[in-house]
């Protein structure tokens, strides 16, 4: 090895040792006769010192600049009282250099990895190899490694086999857009990169591998957000001869293991469980942030009897009046602030935002005149309102009130500092609907995917009330994110065809798209169930971050581009001819 120690390793007990360190120049300070260098690697920073009596090393030290790579040999000494640097674990010692080797120079970097002020993200992504030298990103990569290892250790202890599934498979366009790979050998045909290993892991259950897991790479050509990437990693799990409860208990155990390994915390089990319907009613969405309360309340009974036309007419037309109470926020939100919140909820389809402020035991608002004293008292009781509270209400359809108030709740929770950002609250969401109504195409679609097992007693509603049919599916949510999703799978070919029939997938189309899976179901398929957890997202949440690109070594931009390598890029005409592809579609 070229070095004897890392830059984060030396302590006061190492004083007197001769060591060799290798790393990057983080900073250089010339103190008139002494040169101090902070030498950095992924383990930390160690101060190294150059004195004029070591002429060769001192001469080189005077030429060093940011990001030069060096190898330094010298003796460890104590920095002395009052000279320690508590910011670094090595801050009690320094290395008096006797020999210095300049391994590589660096051009002036576009930004300093050690700077507390970050440049714009596009510049950092273009020079990602420099950005990855930042301590924050190195911490993220190390935590990602630790989490991945903990996941594998847990499943190994519980009898799971880590089995790889193909990256190039068949396109089954029932979800997001596929990334396609043209075949040179079979002209005019394409492989698809996997959106998930869903079908393959079901086939593994039918093949007798009753406990499967994989750290799987997945690809989806969809619109991106700060917490979404076109290629991502998921913890993929499938089990045979199990019921839903077995999956929930297994993942409960995984969560407890991860919280212990990553955060040093004991996670109380079993995890909280909510039904899909309950979550929508209490929080407005199916991925609630449970770090704070401020739950939604229904004002339908009061709204139906009051004289405020907006409320009364909404109830009369089959809509809903719902709201939330921001504790102690009455004086924090002026009329101008509330107007801003009104514009915010309009993004989610709401037409407006009614409000009440609680002062001296009474509600104050421009609309209180439309309510009787008993009705105002009923509103106070419904929200448990106290002096200083702010009540905000939306009158619209069930869907709009849910979407608008859920987003408003998240915004207020952050603005009012209602939770500790480092807290993590994990819960299960159960009993999702099997089908969702597609307004655009005026038909029912599978809510998750068409392989979810329906709740047995709900099959009777398949033709008469399909929206009432529940799926044996489940999501794990954490801090307002969907952190995992799974279901009990259909293992009966007849039930599978019933579901296909209902969503408009004929036997012919089903055979063309999923024939290999349907055939496998006829050769002895055990009951099986599974789940997939977003590894990138879990790393992001454990770090308390809100940008998934900060936990992936080489991410894409929100336009699915790699600024560092220039991907995607055009290719040679010869490559296109080999693949029997002609690109004559005009560029947008």
Image (cartoon, rainbow, N blue to C red):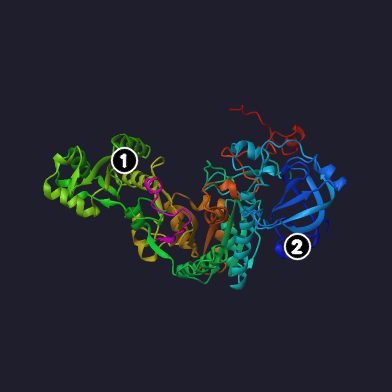
Verify whether residue 553 appears in magenta: no
Answer few, some or many: residues within 10 Å of disc 1's Cα (few below 14, many 20 plus, some between 14 and 19).
some
Q: Which residue is mark 2?
A: 15
Q: Which residues are magenta?
A: 412-430
Verify whether residue 419 appears in magenta: yes
Is 84 left or right of 60, judged from the image as shown?
left
Dot 1 falls on a residue whose secondary structure is: loop
Task: Give the CA separation, mark 1 to mark 2.
Answer: 59 Å
Dot 2 falls on a residue whose secondary structure is: loop
Between 520 and 168, the residue placed more toward the observer is 168
Q: Position of residue 232 (x, y in %)?
A: 59, 50
Between 220 and 437, the residue placed more toward the observer is 220
Q: Which residue is mark 1?
A: 333
Q: Position of residue 362 (x, y in %)?
A: 17, 47
Q: Which image quarter is the N terminus in?
A: bottom right
Mark 1 and mark 2 residues within 8 Å of each other at the beta carbon: no
Q: Position of residue 164 (x, y in %)?
A: 66, 60
Q: Is residue 230 above or below residue 465?
A: above
Answer few, some or many: residues within 10 Å of disc 2's Cα (few below 14, many 20 plus, some between 14 and 19).
some
């Amino acid at each position: 090895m070229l070095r004897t120690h890392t830059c984060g390793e030396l302590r006061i007990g190492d004083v007197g040792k001769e060591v060799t360190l290798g790393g990057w120049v983080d900073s250089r300070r010339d103190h008139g006769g002494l040169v101090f260098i902070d030498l950095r690697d992924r383990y930390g920073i160690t101060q190294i010192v150059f004195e004029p009596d070591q002429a060769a090393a001192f001469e080189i030290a005077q030429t060093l600049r940011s990001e030069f790579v060096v190898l330094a040999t010298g003796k460890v000494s104590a920095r002395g009282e009052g000279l320690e640097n508590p910011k670094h674990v090595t801050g009690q010692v320094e290395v008096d250099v006797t020999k210095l080797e300049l391994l590589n120079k660096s051009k002036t970097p576009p930004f300093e990895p050690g700077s507390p002020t970050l440049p714009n993200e596009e510049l950092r992504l273009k020079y990602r190899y420099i950005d990855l030298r930042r301590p924050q990103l190195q911490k993220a990569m190390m935590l990602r490694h630790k989490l991945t290892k903990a996941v594998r250790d847990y499943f190994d202890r519980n009898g799971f086999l880590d089995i790889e599934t193909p990256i190039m498979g068949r396109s089954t366009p029932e979800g997001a857009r596929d990334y396609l790979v043209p075949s040179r050998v079979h002209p005019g045909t394409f492989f698809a990169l996997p959106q998930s290993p869903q079908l393959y892991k079901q086939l593994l259950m039918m093949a007798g591998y009753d406990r499967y897991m994989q750290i799987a790479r997945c690809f989806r050509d969809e619109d991106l957000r700060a917490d979404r990437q076109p290629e991502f990693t998921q913890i993929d799990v499938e089990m045979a001869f199990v019921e839903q409860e077995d999956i929930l208990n297994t993942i409960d155990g995984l969560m407890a293991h991860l919280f212990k390994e990553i955060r040093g915390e004991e996670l109380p089990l079993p995890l909280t469980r909510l039904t899909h319907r309950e979550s929508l009613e209490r929080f407005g969405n199916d991925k609630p942030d449970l770090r704070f309360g401020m739950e939604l309340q229904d004002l339908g009974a009061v709204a139906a009897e009051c004289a405020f036309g907006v409320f009364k007419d909404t109830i009369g037309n089959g809509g809903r009046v719902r709201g939330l109470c921001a504790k102690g926020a009455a004086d924090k939100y002026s009329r101008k602030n509330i107007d801003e919140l009104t514009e915010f909820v309009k993004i989610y389809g709401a037409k407006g935002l009614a409000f009440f402020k609680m002062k001296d035991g009474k509600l104050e608002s421009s609309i209180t005149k439309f309510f009787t004293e008993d009705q105002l008292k009923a509103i106070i009781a419904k929200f448990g309102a106290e002096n200083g509270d702010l009540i905000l209400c939306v009158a619209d359809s069930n869907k709009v009130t849910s979407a608008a108030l859920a987003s408003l709740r998240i915004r207020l929770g952050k603005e009012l500092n209602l939770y500790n950002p480092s807290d993590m609250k994990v819960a299960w969401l159960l009993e999702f609907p099997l089908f969702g109504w597609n307004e655009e195409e005026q038909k029912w679609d599978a809510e998750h995917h068409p392989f979810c097992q329906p709740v047995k007693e709900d099959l009777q509603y398949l033709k008469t009330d399909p929206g009432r049919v529940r799926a044996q599916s489940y999501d794990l949510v954490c801090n307002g994110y969907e952190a995992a999703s799974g279901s009990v799978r259909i293992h009966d070919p007849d039930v599978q065809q019933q579901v296909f029939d209902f969503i408009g997938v004929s036997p012919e189309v089903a055979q063309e798209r999923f024939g290999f899976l349907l055939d496998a179901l006829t050769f002895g398929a055990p009951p099986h169930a599974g789940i997939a957890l977003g590894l990138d997202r879990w790393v992001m949440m454990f770090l308390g971050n809100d940008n998934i690109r900060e936990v992936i070594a080489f991410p894409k931009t929100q336009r699915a581009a790699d600024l560092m390598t220039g991907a995607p890029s055009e290719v040679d005409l010869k490559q296109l001819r080999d693949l029997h592809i002609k690109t004559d579609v005009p560029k947008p």
